Amino acid sequence: MTDQTVQQPPIPAELLRRIRRIEIRARRLVDHLLLGQYHSVFRGRGLEFSEVREYQPGDDERIIDWNVSARMGSLYVKKYVEERELTIYLLVDASASQAFGTAAQTKAEVAAEIGALLALAAVRNNDRVGLIMFTERVERFVPPRKGAQHVLRVIRDLLYLRPQGCATDVAGAVAFLNRVARRRSVAFLVSDLLAADFQAALRIAARRHDIIAVTMNERRDMRPSSVAVCRR
């Protein structure tokens, strides 16, 4: 499951070309479109607790300190100081439904491009990025690191992984994130969310981390003929 224990055969030449194409496309998008937006969204948010202050209109309700507010008789919020770097986790669905899509691209291929884009944006900002690929189990865990070589490793796994499972357990993947992410992190959940009973797990995780869901749905997903059959 982890990157330390899994041994992989050499990557075929065609897959290397795919990795390179995705890397080039993602770098262009990061350079021209997303870098400023990434910085504005995730920087200045503050991840380390500093003190409390009185609530002001527009403050995020999630940072209200209810214990202090009860004692003081008015609303107070927790104030944070900005960390210089963030930890980004990519939670990527690798279940059988990800093989579904159009003739041009499957959902798995779209997920790989999204993951590459986010990983490159993170590394360009000197942030750490980690990868959790899941089905009904955690298929691959790559701990967060920095650097260009690490990003290539992440892209390789997004494209190359052959999962053992078939179904989708979003709740289990989010629970795994809570176990391995000891500090507050930004987590991108890339999935078609064709799973049950994961809302409670997401609410719990959102108390500790910033969770952003990137949903991938195809118009035929809900048709009976679109249900993926997985045989191992």
Image (cartoon, rainbow, N blue to C red):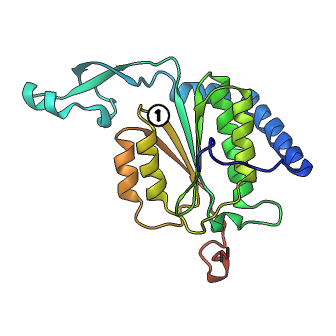
- In the visual, does 153 lie left or right of 173? right
Q: Position of residue 201 (x, y in %)?
A: 38, 54
Q: Where is residue 16 in the image (x, y as percent from the top left)?
A: 86, 45
User: Quarter of the image containing the C terminus?
Assistant: bottom right
Corner quadrant of residue 29: top right
- In the visual, does 168 lie left or right of 63? right
Corner quadrant of residue 220: bottom right
Q: Identity of the amino acid at label 1?
A: Ser
- In the visual, does 73 lie left or right of 107? left
Q: Where is residue 4 in the image (x, y as percent from the top left)?
A: 62, 41
Q: State the count of labels.
A: 1
**Residue at 66% from the left image edge and 69% from the top image edge:** 219
The residue tagged with tag 1: helix, strand or loop? loop
- Which of 172 and 45 lies nearest the eye of the viewer? 172
Q: Where is 106 relative to 202, above or below?
A: below
Q: Can residue 33 be seen in this view?
A: no
**Residue at 66% from the left image edge and 30% from the top image edge:** 121
Corner quadrant of residue 164: bottom right
Q: Is residue 206 visible?
A: yes
Q: Where is residue 88 in the image (x, y as percent from the top left)?
A: 55, 34
Q: Mark 1 points at which residue?
A: 185
- Which of 32 and 209 lies nearest the eye of the viewer? 209
Q: Where is 199 relative to 96, above or below?
A: above
The residue positioned farthest toward the bottom in the image shown: 224
Q: Where is 103 relative to 56, above or below?
A: below
- Binning the other alpha carbons within 10 Å of mark 1 as few (below 14), some (14 to 19) or many (20 upward) gives many
- In the visual, does 224 lie left or right of 85? right
Q: Where is 124 relative to 214, above or below?
A: above
**Residue at 29% from the left image edge and 28% from the top image edge:** 57
